Amino acid sequence: MTVTAPPAPVDAVPTGRRRPGRRRASRVNAGQSRYGYIFVSGYTLLLLAFGLLPTLYAIYLAFTRNGAFVGVDNFVRVFNDYRFLPAVAHVALYIVYWLVSLIVLVVILAIVVHAIRVRWLGNTARFLFYIPGAIAGASSVLLWLFVLDPTVSPVSALLKGMGYESLVNVVAVDNLPVVFTVIAFWAGAGGWIVIMYGALNNISADIMEAARIDGANAIQTAWHIQLPMLTKWISYMGIMSLAAGTQLFVEPKILAQATKNVVPEDYSLNQLAYLYAFRQGDFSGSAAISLILLVVALGLSAVFIFRGKLFERD
Amino acid sequence: MTVVAAAAAGLLVLSGCAPTASGGGEGRYGFTEAEQVPDSEITVWVDASREPAVTAFQEAYPDIPVKLETYDGNAGGSGSFQSKITLMDQAGEGWPDVVFSTQQNDAIWASKQTLNGEQGFAAPLNKGFLDQDFLDGFAPGSLDYATIDGTVYGLRNDLAQTVFFYNQTLLDQFGYEVPTTWEEYGALGDKLAAEHPGYILGSMGDSFMTYVYYGGSESPVFQSPETAVFHSDTSDANAEGISKIIDGMLANGTLVQDSFFSAEFAAKYADKLVGVPGPVWYTGAIFQGGLATPAGQIGVAPPLSWEGGDVAAGNVGGGQWYASSHSKNLDAVKTFLEFVTSADEFQVEASSGYPAYTPAAEKWLDKQAEAAYFVNDDFKTVMSDAAAQVWDGWNVTSWSPETAWAKVVIPGIAAGETVESLLPAWQEELENEATVNGYTVK
């Protein structure tokens, strides 16, 4: 079994010397490979304890009720819940907004920053993009509470210009996918821009120079060279963001609390799962929702993996 | 281990062969006690407004270690009390010893055994844990919301009957009379909007307005005629009538949409509030608190009624104190509960509301009289009469009526829709919530 190393831009484009290099590596002493196992063991243990075992437990819960096997009863109950379909729609809409804006804007911004020749300017731009990512999830939402409330917001003129007079107007249910997209983009895009930048750095200078000599301008280079060579990284970003997006919870939960449930406490699927478990004491129903989420996220991830050729070697 | 032990002990009690007062003395107070650890620290959950209760207790009893934890107090029916406790039930440990909740609906779930066999969170209080003499000190009926099948599970912090507050100074200045009916209230809105625009008669920005306007107008919106049955009829004449009045006043600007507790409200309307129906705790929480209205301006009139109808008051929370059945230091819990509900240091000196504990209530009323806060001398009678006039057609269920209002009506009116047009959607949301909570809609 080969353990896939966590992707890092430096390994993205293998060199021609890679093959012999690997063969030599496989011959290296057992000591080195033992270190390899030691390094991944921590992760593997955590994956088992907090990833795999809870998943198995959720599968068990989803098909049983108070210990007795009930087939798909829990799923039927959840599907018939009046809160289920709206929650699906809310999350789906958010994911579409979030993934499209993330992929388009992050790639454009990374290429633009990469194209900046002035060293300090490029560094500063990357640093600025990255800063919001350093603020952890819940606290960044608290910060946004102030930004979104026209009575205290630093951009209240903008909000009022858009016709929003109060926080209740801004966080109306129809606006929430956009609101959450903006929050998620602000908090998460910077890290991806830095990763994309690394991937761009990794494109061989020879190729870039060849393109330039052939007369390609910046846009042509981006479209025909950089973008195709970034595909893997874009799919990787897609999968990670998809996984995070389907689990939408902290943002609506805090907004619900702050607006005293004007943002409904059953807005997203994860919130609904939470209500099932901790309000209704129905852990089986909660597990059923989690399992539905898992299946959908796996399915969508598969699209990214195969369309993005993520597991193919160059 | 402890879960198994507790469950086993629970089964023993159920099967009627509980060992009598051995060791921990199970069943001494009508529930299975945890093993007691004398002088151990007690954890208390309160909302920000009840922090002074804990501070006062710590001053009075410096020897009892108390760990104060602040949470949202379940405001707006957030349900955080229940969700946190459910998590602890699942873990079988970590429960707080005392919890304050602003809602009245918690006893229904807190009294029940959990799905995995833990005993209900709330400790029965009138089965020997607290003295009957002490419990008798609470205003008649004030413990009803937390009483299930004769067992008291929570102590009422303060009474929350609605009355009509008015600003005598402004009424004199404008030459208006205090309204006594909902119709007069609506008409006053029209007159005020026309003659003195900018002055207001209340706000619809908080979800507890559902109790003030619909409970107070005898609208059969939130009823549970029998256990696990829910009934709502927003098309009733009273509900339609009050909705039309609200819509008219929202349209003419005499009802606003800022929350009473927002900084905005105090900044904009501190000297613009001509009159408002609301619970007696507005005294401390709104007038003496946020708005800082000086003494000698505000008067208290009986709750509004329909023309020709009976006087009926709404009830807006009032708060409950719960003791944990899992507490390891019940002695300290008892001392704490008795202190926060009856001692002058909190209920008379620091609490914003009208104490539910009668001797404290009398002193609180005396304190307001001494400060000459209210302009009318009969404010004591008005307030205590209203306490007995709370409409019994608005019931307590296992969830809060506030969430449906917050989800449907508040965003709706913010988007410019009328309350009347939102009534069917509101009722649908209420009925859906009832179904989810295991109630039959009739």
Image: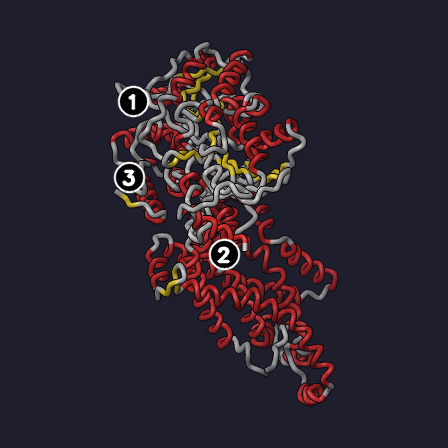
Chain under disc 2:
A
- Could you tell me which secondary element the residue under label 2 belongs to? loop
Question: In the rendered structure, which amino acid carries the disc numbered 1?
Answer: Trp
- Residue under label 1: B306
In which image quadrant can residue B191 be found?
top left
Question: In the rendered structure, which amino acid carries the disc numbered 3?
Answer: His
Q: Which of marks 2 and 3 is in front?
A: 3
- Residue under label 2: A248
Question: In the rendered structure, which amino acid carries the disc numbered 2?
Answer: Leu
Q: Report how far apart the C-alphas of labels 1 and 2 lie in the structure.
A: 47 Å
Q: How crowded is mark 2: few (under 14 residues within 10 Å), some or many (20 or more)?
A: many
**Closest to the observer, B310 or A12:** B310
Residue at 71% over, 58% down: A124
* Image marks 2 and 3: residues in contact by CB distance under 8 Å: no
In which image quadrant can residue B144 be found?
top left
Give residue A137's position: percent from left, percent from top.
58, 53
Chain under disc 1:
B
Q: Report how far apart the C-alphas of labels 1 and 3 lie in the structure.
A: 22 Å
Classify the position of the N terminus of chain B by image quarter: bottom right
Give residue B223's position: percent from left, percent from top.
31, 36
Residue B231, which numbered label? 3
| Horizontal side of residue A101 vs B227, given as left or right | right
Q: Nearer the viewer, mark 1 or mark 3?
A: 3
